[in-house]
């Protein structure tokens, strides 16, 4: 293991932080795609030089960027740099930013509305890509979680995207509703041992699983509690903030749920959840992350549930080495006074170097790194734009 | 040739410096200009008009010859000065946001 790249998506562009295995000195490149919101960027596990980026804007909509050389150059798939952008007949080569919901009768999903804030039904409208999840085995296959919530897939390197319509059409869609940040599909977990199995999570609908490659889906929310809804245990309607699993134990899931819920785990692929918040100071937070080599070691960043800032101005990561229930605060190197930033759901990541590195970014523009599994932290950068996402890529 | 001025971020996406010149076949309208622009610069598809509805994105406006044409029919002819190439067709992003 030679080093690590940390991909940081911010409100004003993307930054790539690179270091060797010691993770003490960092090279910082960026902003890439300056001025655009970078909701997420992630490298392919099958090709370390292949990186995909979700670039979005309230003005200009969605753009997908791709690098084939580890981030040195970028292009929108279908229009490689230096090549003609159209076919000899004048037609565009690709439409990498075209995300159109599949309402065809053939898919069995002619669903067009979900629940709106006022309880009425509202048309599904594509807004942006929240999360990109490259296939574990094929660099040209990528999943995208979008707002309004749906799952898309490309099999040609992001030139064209097609909705996996069975999710939106499986039956509970009319009960899904947006959270304050929109109705986004923000978590996609692939199972290396079973390519037919995918877990996803949506705010505010809940967690779902397919066991047949996306044809059929079912809600997996039993055991979760939403104290802020009239029915605390509905089939769907949960504001899942983040979900994580360990590659060695894909049937074990950990979840950070919205306020009123807390941290949960499932040992049977989501069929049943158990609350494991234990001695955490609050039940509210956004990200949850897992240690690369210890499947029972997980990390969360609890926040004041009403202010969504660190409790008493003290930024603390909490770690459990027992898969929940028992938690310890990690503070060495983190600000312990006057700190009022947030850490968003996709803004925490782990590398898989021998000594696992943990990273997270804040809405104040700091990116913190720990090269010792969270025991101590140092800021890599302090003054980026608000951080939306953090991903760590361990370089071969 | 029809001259088109793009906002900063779309110039970056299309990898062009200043205004662009495009050939438009037939009548010169908003629709035919944007069709030709997107055919020449396909990376702009979906960034000016919605992929499905073909509606102008709400935070963009179209101007020419000092006039706001944003609410004109997309099939209405553009001013003669645009057709002759003496004036550009402006695509302007809202000056808003933080």
Image (cartoon, rainbow, N blue to C red):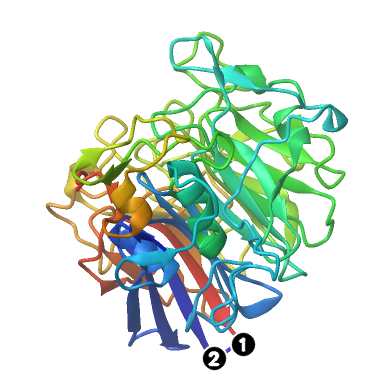
Q: Quadrant of the C terminus of chain A?
A: bottom right
Q: Nearer the viewer, residue A40 or A153?
A: A153
Q: Which mark is residue A114?
A: none
On the question of residue A26 being in view, the answer is: yes
The residue at the point 70 percent across, 65 percent down is A89
Q: Are marks 2 and 1 in contact (CB under 8 Å)?
A: yes
Which chain is mark 1 on? A
Q: Quadrant of the N terminus of chain A?
A: bottom right
Q: CA distance from mark 2 to mark 1?
A: 6 Å
| Residue B20 percent location from the top left of the image | 37, 66
The quadrant in which residue A105 appears is top right
Q: Nearer the viewer, residue A313 or B82?
A: B82
Q: Which mark is residue A2?
A: 2
The residue at the point 83 percent across, 57 percent down is A195
| Residue A303 percent location from the top left of the image | 32, 41
Q: Is residue B91 above or below residue A102?
A: below
- In the picture of the structure, the residue carrying the numbered disc 1 is A396
| Residue B18 percent location from the top left of the image | 29, 69
Please, what secondary structure does the residue beneath circle 2 have?
loop
Left or right: residue A319 compared with residue A189 = left
């Amino acid at each position: 293991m030679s080093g690590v790249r940390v991909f940081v998506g911010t409100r004003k562009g993307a930054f790539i932080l690179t270091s060797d295995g010691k993770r003490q000195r960092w090279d910082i490149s960026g902003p890439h795609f300056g001025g655009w919101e970078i909701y997420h960027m992630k490298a392919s596990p099958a090709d370390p030089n292949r990186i995909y980026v979700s670039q979005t804007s309230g003005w200009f909509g969605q753009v997908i960027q791709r690098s084939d050389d580890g981030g040195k150059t970028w292009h929108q798939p279908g229009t490689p740099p230096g090549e003609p952008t159209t076919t000899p007949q004048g037609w565009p080569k690709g439409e990498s930013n075209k995300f159109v919901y599949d309402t065809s009768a053939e898919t069995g999903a002619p669903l067009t509305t979900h629940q709106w804030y006022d309880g009425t039904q509202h048309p599904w409208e594509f807004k942006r890509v929240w999360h990109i999840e490259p296939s574990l085995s094929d660099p040209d296959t990528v999943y995208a979680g979008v707002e309004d919530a749906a799952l898309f897939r490309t099999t040609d390197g992001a030139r064209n995207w097609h909705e996996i319509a069975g999710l939106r059409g499986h039956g509970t869609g009319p009960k899904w509703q947006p959270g304050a940040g929109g109705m986004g599909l923000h978590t996609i977990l692939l199972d290396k041992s079973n390519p037919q199995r995918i877990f996803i999570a949506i705010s505010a609908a809940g967690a779902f699983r397919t066991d047949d490659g996306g044809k059929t889906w079912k809600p997996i929310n039993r055991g979760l509690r939403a104290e802020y809804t009239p029915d605390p245990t509905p089939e769907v309607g949960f504001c899942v903030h983040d979900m994580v699993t360990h590659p060695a134990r894909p049937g074990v899931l950990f979840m950070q749920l919205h306020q009123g819920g807390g941290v949960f785990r499932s040992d049977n692929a989501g069929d049943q959840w158990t609350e494991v918040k234990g001695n955490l100071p609050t039940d509210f937070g956004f990200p949850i992350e897992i240690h690369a080599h210890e499947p029972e070691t997980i990390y969360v960043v609890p926040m004041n549930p009403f202010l969504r800032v660190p409790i008493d101005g003290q930024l603390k990561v909490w770690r459990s080495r027992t898969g929940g229930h028992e938690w310890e605060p990690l503070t060495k190197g983190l600000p312990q006074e006057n700190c009022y930033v947030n850490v968003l759901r996709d803004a925490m990541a782990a590398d898989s170097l021998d000594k696992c590195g943990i990273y997270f970014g804040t809405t104040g523009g700091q990116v913190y790194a720990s090269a010792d599994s969270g025991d101590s932290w140092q800021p890599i950068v302090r003054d980026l734009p608000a951080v939306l996402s953090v991903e760590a890529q361990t370089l071969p | 040739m029809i001259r088109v001025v793009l906002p900063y971020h779309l110039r970056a996406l299309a990898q062009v410096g200043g205004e662009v010149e495009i050939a438009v076949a037939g009548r010169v309208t908003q629709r035919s200009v944007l069709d030709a622009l997107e055919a020449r610069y396909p990376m702009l598809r979906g960034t000016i008009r919605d992929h499905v509805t073909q509606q102008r994105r709400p935070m963009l406006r179209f101007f020419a010859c000092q006039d706001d044409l944003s609410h004109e029919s997309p099939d209405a002819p553009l001013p003669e000065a645009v057709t002759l190439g003496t004036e550009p067709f402006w695509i302007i992003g809202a000056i808003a946001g933080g």
